Amino acid sequence: MSATPHVAWSREPEDRAGTPLVVLLHGYGSHEQDLIGLVPGLPADFTYASVRAPVEMEFGGYTWFDLDVERLAYSSSAARAAVEDLWEWIASVKDQHSSVTLLGFSMGMAMATSLLRSRPEDFAAVVGLSGFAVDPTRGEGLEDYFDDEALAAAKVPFFWGRDQEDPIIPSEHVEYTHSWATKTVKLTKVLYAGAGHGVVPQEISHVGEFLTHIVLNPR
């Protein structure tokens, strides 16, 4: 495994036991302090852990794996290795918590959905913001890694928030993600006009409601 990741926690170690965990996964070129800034607007019942991506970039910030930002092209083997390393860290802390939910922004959504697809039984819910799911047919090493059949049976709740006019995520990535999500997860999809490639306050409010009703108070 790679070195233990740098993590920004919302609670001190002695206050985490038994709480539901939300793992926050930032976007390309960002860092762990980015998404931890969302925590004041989210339910206080959870413990939030914002994980720094492992690859330091030349001009600042971090990435989960090398990415051609013009085409959103990447090595499938590198993406899979990044997911496996992140899972190893999650596995080391998950037993301290009552459940694990993933929240990923942009490239972090690709990581969150890949984790979900490789281990459908391990997550209570997933939130994806302004991002995409990885198409395993675009490279080698992922088609036999994802278990979408098991995920479809599990129907894990998934919240997907985005702006229809997001200038960063190509339409083919959005179309694939929509097709994948409608077949495999219990989808809540909300569009936020004016958000661009970002997150707006109404979206955070909706995410908080989703976490409360789906994870804290499931029917």
Image (cartoon, grey):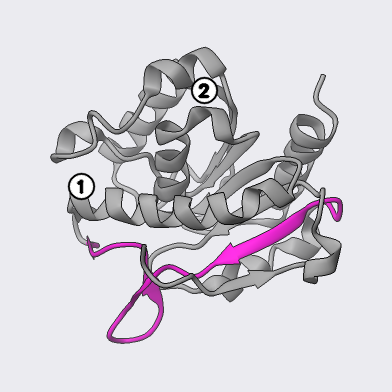
Residue occupying image coordinates x 24% and y 62%: 69
> Position of 1 compared to 119: left or right?
left
- What residue appears at the point 78 percent right and 68 percent down from the top-left corner? 13
Q: Amino acid at mark 2?
A: Val
Q: Quadrant of residue 117?
A: top left
Q: Which residue is mark 1?
A: 76
In the displayed structure, 99 sits above or below 36; it is above
Q: Is residue 114 above or below residue 147?
A: below
Image point (70%, 44%), residue name: 207
Residue range corresponding to the magenta coloring = 43-69
Q: Nearer the viewer, residue 12 or 103?
A: 12
Dot 2 corresponds to which residue? 185
Residue 44 lies in the magenta stretch: yes
Q: Nearer the viewer, residue 163 or 90?
A: 90
> At label 1, which amino acid type do we have?
Ser
Does residue 2 appear to the left or right of 153 in the view shown? left
- Percent of width and height locating residue 106: 44, 54
Does residue 167 show up?
no
